């Protein structure tokens, strides 16, 4: 009976201590977008990888005892693709929300895994013309039609140092299309227009400072 009471007392003490030790921090996050090159079946257009960046405020909530928490960010994000060596940029607001599990040495250092959804609101949505590979292919000029909204899933790992610095490596997997490639030459004839969906997977390297 005494052992049962002791266990209950310990459990109650832990549950009461958790809200006190739970930490909510605000910070600033920035990093690099490394956008992959999606494959398409349009031979007249080469799609290549490109590099962009992101920056903005974030919040980080954690319960040290059990290692569970989450973070959320409101980021200005720039990304895009290269079409026949011509870079077409997307600029917009990215809102990732990740559930995190951390293991570590208290405030000195910890490592974490994270996963969750991310929404991207594109300021540069709409159709943009793409120059052909060579002048002889001018009649085969395509366009890229970027979507106004994208949904994706994040999966990543990282480390928190000295209770303030946070570094992370994240892989962003698109759920919805980022854009469509459209063959403008055939579209003008009224025939069925070849279109290719683009879903650009992105690696993200980030550094954050939590206040």
Image: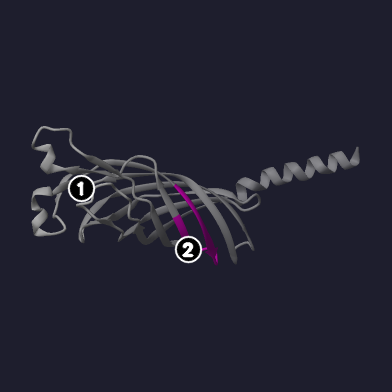
**For discs 1 and 2, the disc positioned in front in the rendered view:** 1
**Mark 1 closeness class: few <14, some 14–19, many ≥20 residues within 10 Å:** some
| Up/down of 109 relative to 91, above or below | below
Number of numbered tags placed on the structure image: 2
Question: Foreground: 154 or 47?
Answer: 47
Q: Is residue 206 magenta?
A: no
Relative placement, left or right, of 206 versus 191 is right
Q: Measured from the top left, where is residue 165 in percent x and y?
A: 49, 65
Badge 1 or badge 2: first in the primary sequence: 1
Front residue of 191 and 196: 191
Q: CA distance from mark 1 to mark 2?
A: 29 Å
Q: Position of residue 158 (x, y in %)?
A: 52, 60
Q: Residue furthest right?
A: 1
Q: Quadrant of the N terminus?
A: top right
Near mark 2 (Cα within 10 A), the count class, few <14, some 14-19 or many ≥20, is: some
In this view, the residue in front, 95 or 126, is 126
The secondary structure type at the circle numbered 1 is: loop
Residue at 13% of width from left, 33% of height from top? 191
Residue 80, quarter of the rendered image: bottom left
Q: Identify the residue at image location x=85%, y=39%.
A: 5
Q: Circle 1 is placed at which residue position?
A: 124
Q: Which residues are magenta?
A: 154-170
Q: Which residue position holds label 2?
A: 167
Q: Which mark is residue 66?
A: none
The residue lying at 16 percent from left, 58 percent from top is 133
Location of residue 109 in the rendering, given as x and y in whole percent from the top left corner: 59, 65
């Amino acid at each position: 009976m005494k052992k049962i009471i002791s266990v209950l007392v310990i459990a109650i003490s832990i549950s009461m201590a958790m809200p006190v030790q739970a930490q909510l921090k605000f910070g600033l996050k920035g990093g690099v977008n490394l956008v992959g090159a999606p494959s398409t079946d349009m031979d007249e257009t080469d799609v290549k990888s490109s590099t962009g960046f992101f920056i903005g405020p974030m919040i980080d909530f954690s319960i040290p005892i059990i290692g569970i928490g989450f973070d959320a960010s409101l980021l200005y994000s720039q990304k895009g693709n290269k079409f026949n060596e011509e870079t077409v940029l997307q600029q917009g607001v990215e809102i990732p929300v990740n559930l995190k599990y951390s293991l570590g040495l208290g405030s000195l250092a910890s490592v974490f895994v994270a996963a969750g959804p991310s929404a991207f609101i594109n300021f540069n949505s709409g159709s943009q013309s793409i120059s052909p590979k060579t002048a002889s292919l001018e009649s085969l000029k395509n366009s890229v039609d970027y979507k106004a909204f994208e949904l994706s899933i994040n999966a990543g790992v990282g480390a928190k140092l000295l209770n303030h610095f946070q570094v992370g490596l994240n892989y962003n997997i698109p759920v919805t299309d980022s854009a469509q490639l459209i063959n403008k030459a055939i579209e003008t004839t009224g025939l069925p227009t070849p279109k290719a969906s683009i879903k650009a997977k992105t690696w993200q390297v980030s550094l954050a400072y939590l206040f």
